[in-house]
Image (cartoon, rainbow, N blue to C red):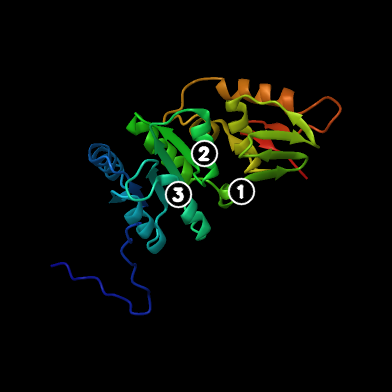
Amino acid sequence: MTMPSEINPSQPVPLAPQPVAATRILLIEDDSKIAQEVVEELESRGFHVQHEESGAAGLSMGLNAHFDVMVVDRMLPELDGLTLIETLRERKVHVPVLVLSALSAVDDRVSGLKAGGDDYLTKPFAMEELAARLEALLRRPDNSRQTMLRAGPLEMDLIERTVTRAGVPIDLLPREFRLLEYLMRRPNQVLTRNMLLEDVWNYRFIPQTNLVDVHIGKLRRKIDESGKPALIQSIRGAGFMLRVP
């Protein structure tokens, strides 16, 4: 007969692992069909989604409850999405916000960002892209609400979409701008190719590609001018780094 093992009262009893709290997402969308699809998709990925149909209800929820990220439709009843976001920012609510809109012109995107949005996704959209963008927002560092970034001699205006080095303007293509923004938010950190592919290109799988190296090369030729200290450096076997004093 096997006797039960004795428990030594002087030894701590291991605790059962506690479940990790689900990421909380506030969805403010008046189109019931879109809302249902978004809720089902995000909850299937383990997120907890709170859905509100009007701008007024969404604002109240955003001000009085904690969320990790918000998805806000631009055209809402009672209170439009941009006014909602502006009010949240005025009330010091800095939760990342993804703006949804059927308006896709550059001026519309700029308006969404100026109102305080962190990203802008036009309708119709793929659920995979929505999820990838939300995951990217959740990975952003604490300085993500800044509209001016500075790293050594580099300055980036996120509203006007301009970049200068020591006061000299640098003309960047949209993807180059996004890549440099990612680097400037993480100065003196080693960034792997996989990180860049996931966060800058929104790849959910890692293809065999030299895409990162090609864009880093183009960015270097614009940022690291002849005769000036090189800022973008390759880290052998690891990735790249924006090295600044």
Q: Residue at x 61, y 39 (%)?
A: 159
Q: Is mark 1 on a helix, strand or loop?
A: loop
Residue contact at pointers 2 and 1, CB within 8 angstroms = no
Residue contact at pointers 1 and 3, CB within 8 angstroms = no
Q: Which residue is drawn at 61% across and 48% down?
A: 146
Q: How far apart are marks 3 and 2 (CA)?
A: 11 Å
Front residue of 83 and 214? 83
Q: Quadrant of residue 29?
A: top left
Front residue of 81 and 49? 81
Q: Identity of the amino acid at label 2?
A: Ser
Q: Where is residue 75 in the image (x, y as percent from the top left)?
A: 37, 41
Q: Which residue is drawn at 39% across and 35% down?
A: 101
Q: In which quarter of the image is residue 172?
A: top right
Q: Which residue is label 3 attached to?
A: 83
Q: Which of marks 2 and 1 is nearer the N terminus?
A: 2
| Residue found at the far front of this picture | 78
Indicate which label's residue lies in the foreground, 2 or 1. Answer: 2
Mark 1: give few (<14), some (14-19) or many (20+) Cα within 10 Å. few
Q: Which of marks 3 and 2 is nearer the N terminus?
A: 3
Q: Identity of the amino acid at label 3?
A: Thr
Q: Where is residue 6 in the image (x, y as percent from the top left)?
A: 26, 74
Q: Identity of the amino acid at label 1?
A: Gln
Q: Is mark 2 on a helix, strand or loop?
A: helix
Q: What element carries label 3?
A: helix
Mark 2: give few (<14), some (14-19) or many (20+) Cα within 10 Å. some
Q: Distance between the residues labelled 1 and 3?
A: 19 Å
Q: Where is residue 84 in the image (x, y as percent from the top left)?
A: 43, 51
Vertical comparison of 231 with 172: above or below: below
Q: Distance between the residues labelled 2 and 1?
A: 16 Å
